[in-house]
Image (cartoon, rainbow, N blue to C red):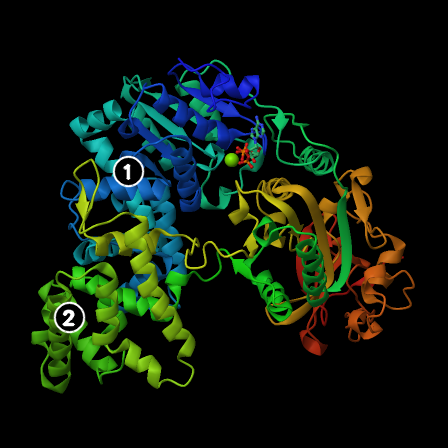
Amino acid sequence: ALTPDHPLLRGLNPEQLAAVTLPPQHALVLAGAGSGKTRVLTTRIAWLLATGQVGPGGILAVTFTNKAAREMLARLTALLPLNVRGMWVGTFHGLCHRLLRAHHATVGLPATFQILDMQDQLGAIKRLLKGLGIDEERLAPKELQGFINGAKEDGLRPRDLAPRDPDARLKIELYQRYEEQCQREGVVDFGELMLRSYELLRDHRPLRQHYQRRFRHILVDEFQDTNRLQYAWLKLLAGEVEDGRFVPCGNAVMAVGDDDQSIYAFRGARVGNMADFVREFGIEAPIKLERNYRSVGHILRAANHLIEHNRQRLGKSLRPQRGEGEPVRVIELPSDFEEARWVVEEIGQLLRDGVPAREIAVLYRSNAQSRALEGALFQAGVPYRVWGGLRFFERAEIKHALAYLRLLDNPRDDTSFLRVVNFPPRGIGARTLEQLQQAAREAGCALADAVTLVGGRGGAALTAFVARLDVMRERCAGLTLGDIVRTVLDDSGLLAHYRAERDGAERIENLEELVAAAHAFVQQEGLGEAAADPDGLTVSPLVAFLTHAALESGDHQAQAGQDAVQLMTVHAAKGLEFDAVFITGLEEGLFPHENSLTAHDGLEEERRLMYVAITRARQRLTLTWAQTRMLHGSTRYHIPSRFLDELPADSLQWLSPPRGRGAGWGVPQPAWGRSALGQGDDARPAALAGLPPAAVATPEAPVSAAGAAIRAGMTVFHPKFGEGQVLAVEGRGADARAHVHFRRHGPKWLALAVARLTPVE
Ligand code: ATP
Ligand code: MG
């Protein structure tokens, strides 16, 4: 047996040690941010392996991102001399994909099935609607996409849905057609990965029992963000339903999570899974970890104080294990532009102080906010990396190259076919393609098989395209992955096309990077000729690479290893930690997001997001907000986020004069209205000294139907809605609108030309 002073266990506190060395049984670790949940999970796997209780093949571990899975594997290999290839560590999607690859025939998928990302899926849906002659006005493709994905997340097939009205009937019918189309083309979307593998386990008892016996230990990180279907999937691996009751089957499930960090409700995450897990798996008491090893005292106190404003909590406490550190700094800036510039200056100072760039993170609520920050970083010559945003694999030129690669493997992939049949342009017109699709529909076959059915010059061009693909396929046979990609770029004409384009240089660079990524992929994954894992599962390196491209969510590796400042949304920062963190855009309407104010539990979810954001910081935390911000093409005037009011004053250091929203729902302080407009405001933030006053001035304020000038920050009265506070004013003249948060009626947009708003003194 291993004693607690074994290097594997050294440094764990008693509660952590108990969790790591728990005898095989179901357990829930319920603990706050930075308390070592992920560390406990990883160390437990190492401990189970080191004590010989289980081999690598007996472990199933679920992480929230691919990056987290890689980190877990890296840490394990550092702790133990192991071959981790047989170990199942990944996201739910990654693990489901692995199951489907192993049992594709059982679920009726071709061996070469490919994954549709959200963008491909939308394309496939548009194509479906067009083929059926359904106008986008009648049904927006995005709406149908949301409907289909929502149904799949709930584990529902078209036949499980009951039409309530003609609208619903149409959607269900289209869901059915969409499934048929995907099946014909040999592609699956993200939701399908999860649902199909759920059905695989549910409907095939021997197979289910095989995996139940195999995975002796199932470990799940970030359990609070699992959805219904994911929890049901876990249950299939961990027990049987007998007489309507769930009976665990003898393996051990350890879930770790934090209800205060549940931030994916909009994608179906269900905190209630925690309570169900405790009940259904017969857990006596959740294990609690109460020491926070990540953040200094001031930061931790800010987080604790904030989250106490939420009502729906299981209740946990966290004690700091590190010094007090520096207080949390807060600054008000006149515009998003100035905010970005200020943050970049501060980053410069941190870098000069010797903080590594990768230890600095800038977080924001919405992706759109990254643009100003990127601009400022670029200008200052600071290397940075944006997570999320447009992923490498989503760029047009990369999608084109991937489409050719997919067609090598699966000529029936109609989505890919249509993407490149006339790219680079080869004179195949829209009419020819309509004819082709019509012919394929009638013959019930793939587009590639229908080309001979189209006559004339168009038909000849289509046949030539398919022949070209065949030649490409032959030329690639036996080549390494990197060489396949290179060959496809040349033979498809993609490289030549972009070379001839005026601003094709960046696209060519990206395509070259794709070749490099393919080479690196083979090395990293240790793929030789074929990717075999101990399950006897074999896929070609090309299929493995294409899968990687589809599943990789924002973790673009091409710049990995480069020391760069990290930019990401708060959602993407979950589970991560950095020495210094900037949370930007702390404004009402932005963070908390305006959509949250009307949603059920919306504000509490936003507060949990803020809690996640704060708890990413180890030593330094800085909060910024801007009075004006360019969003979707117009300038909006903002007031500071209510979350700033919910932080403990004695852990804050204001770099500009403090501006709370005041008490309660937010009666603005008298000084506020002036400062937002920068008129006669002598208390401008010290950091802004030297800026021309124009930077904080506003254009003329629009006038309401009652004849009063309306400005952001004002308290106003409306004859119907009563008293409210102006959050933002947009547009000019007849188009001017105000976003007003009414005390009784919540936020509303009002056209000033008709709204009888009067200022309240
Ligand atoms: P989150 O909720 O944000 O995912 P977490 O609970 O998973 O956080 P970890 O990321 O596992 O927390 O740990 C936070 C930090 O504390 C890590 O840097 C980890 O190495 C460190 N840590 C955890 N336990 C200890 C310990 N006993 N001694 C020293 N450092 C520790
Ligand atoms: Mg964690």
Viewport quadrant of the N terminus: top left
Label 2 neighbour load within 10 Å: few <14, some 14-19, many 20+:
many
Query: Considering the numbered disc 1 on the image, is that residue within a helix, a strand or a loop?
Result: helix
Secondary structure type for disc 2: helix
Which amino acid type is marked by label 2?
A: Met
Tell me the quarter of the picture where residue 726 sits.
bottom right
- Alpha-carbon span between mark 2 and mark 1: 32 Å
Under mark 1, the amino acid is: Arg
Crowd rating for badge 1 (residues with CA inside 10 Å; few <14, some 14–19, many 20+): some
Q: Nearer the viewer, mark 2 or mark 1?
A: 1
Residue 104 x %, y %: 17, 44
Residue closest to the eye, 189 or 565: 565
Determine whether 451 is above or below 207 in the image.
Answer: below
Report which residue position mark 1 lands on: 85
Left or right relative to 553: residue 646: right
- Front residue of 57/29: it is 57
Image x and y of residue 449, in percent: 10, 68
Q: Is residue 539 left or right of residue 30?
A: left
Position of 621 relative to 709 (above/below): above
Residue 698 showing in the rendered view: yes
Give the label on residue 472, or none. Answer: 2
**The residue at label 2 has a CB less than 8 Å from ligand 2:** no
| Closer to the camera in the image, 710 or 405 | 405
Residue sitting at x 81%, y 46%: 653
* Between discs 2 and 1, the one toward the N terminus: 1
Q: Is residue 685 visible?
A: no
Q: Position of residue 320 (x, y in %)?
A: 68, 29
Name the mark on residue 651. none
Q: Give the image location of residue 534, x and y in percent.
A: 20, 36
Q: Residue at x 67, y 28 (%)?
A: 321
Q: Dividing the picture into quarters, in which one does residue 261 lie?
A: top right
